[in-house]
Amino acid sequence: MTEIPEHLLKRSKAAKAKADGAEGEPASSVPATTTAAATPVAKPAAVPAKAKAVIAAKPVKQDPPYVVAAKTRKKMPFWAVGALSMLPLWGFLYVRGMQPDIKKDTSPMGVGNGLYSSAACAGCHAADGSGGTGRALYNGEVLLTFPKIEDQLNFVYTGSSAYSLAGLTTYGDPNRAGGAHASSGYNGAAMPAQSQLTGGSLTDAQILAVVCDERYNLGGAMAKVTAGDATWTKEYNAWCAPTAQNYLDLETGTKTFATLTGVGTKPRATATG
Ligand code: HEC
């Protein structure tokens, strides 16, 4: 047996230890992690490539036809903006124009026509004047009772109870065709007083207006005026025409039933001639 010299053994040990240290370190930790991390890094590299293709395609994309149409068609003409902005005003005037403007008819006939309904006359005498709780006014009936408008004005002002209270058994023309009308002789009912001064709600001008409606519209006297009858035309012009002086005087307060010739505010036995 040959003995290996001591210094060679030491050199050999040192070389072995060095070799162990160099090989052992990479094998124990580093390779395990580096291989695992290397795989995911390689895969994502493919995705950005696709994304790049999509991004590259976008600028080439065409507008849909309706967008192209909207971009290329003519814009609204400048004058049309102003014209169209007036549409609501036009609509408002149109609707107003379609409504009958009752307030505008300030003539006695126009005012009276409205009052006949709103002042409840129609409730007792019917819308066409054919009567009900109250006597019939149409077909010339009211003209037979009151040949003169002054007497009808007086009667509507006072009401028929005032006649009874004054001891008068009839009102209107005592020689009326069909007989004089008795106070409270119709259905046992009375004609309510209409003046604001007798418990009613109407002014003198309003009483005249509604009486004009009863005589010339419901009663049928307008036909006589149209036919050229001198007596009826004279009465109409004085009391019920749009320019009738008596109506204007009552409206302005220049005159009242108390001061108007032939009317008066007290019930009376016979109709004025
Ligand atoms: C509550 C029911 C009632 C109301 C409302 C009424 N009347 Fe009368 N009217 C009568 C009655 C009832 C008579 C008959 C009077 C009598 O017999 O005394 C009459 C009679 C008359 C007459 C006489 C007719 C004739 O030929 O004898 C006139 C005109 C008249 N009324 C006008 C009017 C006017 C205008 C109004 C509305 C402002 C009116 N009346 C509202 C009940 C009514």
Image (tube, grey):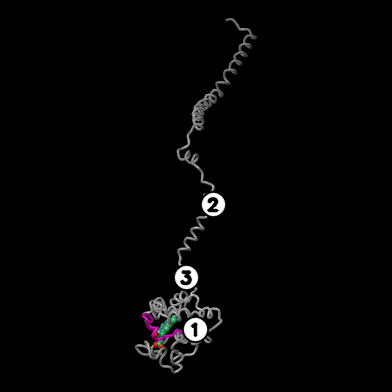
- Asked if residue 24 is positioned above or below residue 114 in the image, the reply reads above
Assign a secondary structure to mark 2: helix
* Image position, residue 92 (x, y; %): 49, 60
* Image position, residue 211 (x, y; %): 45, 81
Q: Is 18 in front, or is 73?
A: 73
> Which residue is denoted by mark 3 in the rendering?
102
Mark 3 Cα-neighbour bin, 10 Å: few <14, some 14–19, many ≥20: few
Contact between marks 2 and 3 (CB within 8 A): the answer is no
First-in-chain label (3 vs 1) = 3
Our reading of the magenta stretch's main secondary structure is: loop
Q: Is 225 in front, or is 62?
A: 225
Question: Magenta region: which residues?
Answer: 135-149
> Which residue is denoted by mark 2 in the rendering?
82
| Mark pair 3, 1: CA separation | 23 Å
Mark 2 Cα-neighbour bin, 10 Å: few <14, some 14–19, many ≥20: few
* Image position, residue 17 (x, y; %): 60, 16
Residue 28 location, quadrant: top right
